[in-house]
Image (spheres, helix red, strand yellow):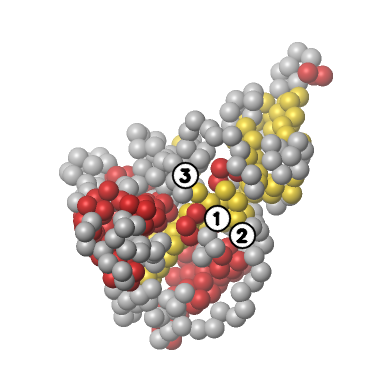
Amino acid sequence: MAHRVEELALAGTRTGTRRYLTVHRFGTPGARPKAYVQAGLHADEIPGMLVAHHLIGALAAADAAGTLRGEVVVVPVANPGGLAQVVAGVPVGRYALDRDGNFNRGFADLADAAEAGVRGRLGSDAESNVALIREALRAAHAGRTPRGDATEVETQRHALLGLALDADLVFDLHCDMEAVVHLYTGDALWPDAADLAAELGAEAVLLARDSGGGPFDEACSSPWWTLAERLADEGPVPPACLAATVELRGKADVDDPIAAADAAALMRVLMRRGVVAGDPGPLPALRCAATPLGGLDRVLAPAAGVVSLRKRPGDRVAAGEAVADIIDPAATDPARARTTLVARTAGILMARTNLRFAGPGDLIASIAGAEVLDARGHGLLFD
Ligand SMILES: [Zn+2]
């Protein structure tokens, strides 16, 4: 089937306003494997939107050439309401300005409802189990259709999950502040996702079973390992949805040639996975080992001050090495104005702030290390 474009209506915000998700569809609905790609869920993270633009072009060309085997759904702007949030000239795309919080949190966990739908019905054939669970996930999702009093963001979360939840591959394109390419994905999905990491040249891969807060990728993938555990006595349940949050460098890394190369990398992943026919060529070498999300050293500002960074994204650091200074410009004694921040772990500095003044507790840098650090009181994701 030819390339189709649909508009999915979200709930209205206030009287007289309504937004839509633009959904690009390729291939025959129901064809396998199915891939789902979205960008801009954090609406001020633009690199993925340009990658989606190039990917849509490549998929349209594959469709015209008759090489599309599976189904692909692309949502290049996953959060139009967030994109409209501009305060005094500054885009605010990570959090809803009303009460809906972080746009990439609070996605529904469908595991309980899906479990109730399949308990007692699984068997020894993994493939039939996958089909039964997908059906139960769809039913669980339909059972959570937002009511009339739902907010625009609630209907957006529901609509996005509905487009992706039965996909074999889910790539949620984000970016950090200043960063090298890195991925967040599930423990159960590694090393299966190594082709994605290798093709994109990821320099860090962070693994977690439950990173907390209900991010989009885990809403798609985690029901599979939850059900695999709970229904182990009934039969095999493979992790049938490879979902990853793909961090495409920093906010300012928006560049046509880089985005075209990223889209080509994703096309090669789709080829390796049989979604698109074609020869992807040899798989590039992995640039990193996967590390636990619990091993991510979040270097925080202990006090307010000017941020002076000593390391760049991609730099390797040793435990105890200085990565940044926070300088209180108003200190009475300049000799006592400076606090040097050091790495708690050895690893790669995968991301750092793009702001140069911090408040207490602000995130300054993230270092991916191999050893799990002491447990924190909140979810593993920063906010
Ligand atoms: Zn993001």
Who comes first in sequence, dot 2 or dot 1? Answer: 1
Q: Quadrant of residue 47?
A: bottom right
Horizontal side, residue 337 vs residue 56: left or right = right
Q: Is residue 65 left or right of residue 160?
A: right
Question: Is the distance from the Cβ of mark 3 to the nearest ligand 1 atom less than 8 Å?
Answer: no
Q: Residue at x 26, y 54 (%)?
A: 114
Q: Nearer the viewer, mark 1 or mark 3?
A: 3
Q: Which residue is mark 3?
A: 211
Dividing the picture into quadrants, the one containing residue 308 is top right
Q: Secondary structure at mark 3?
A: loop
Name the residue carrying label 1: 183
Q: Relative to 76, say whether 70 is above or below.
A: below
- Residue type at mark 1? Leu
Residue 74 horizontal/vertical position (percent): 40, 65
Does 274 sit left or right of 175 as displayed? left
Mark 2 closeness class: few <14, some 14–19, many ≥20 residues within 10 Å: many
Element marked by disc 1:
strand
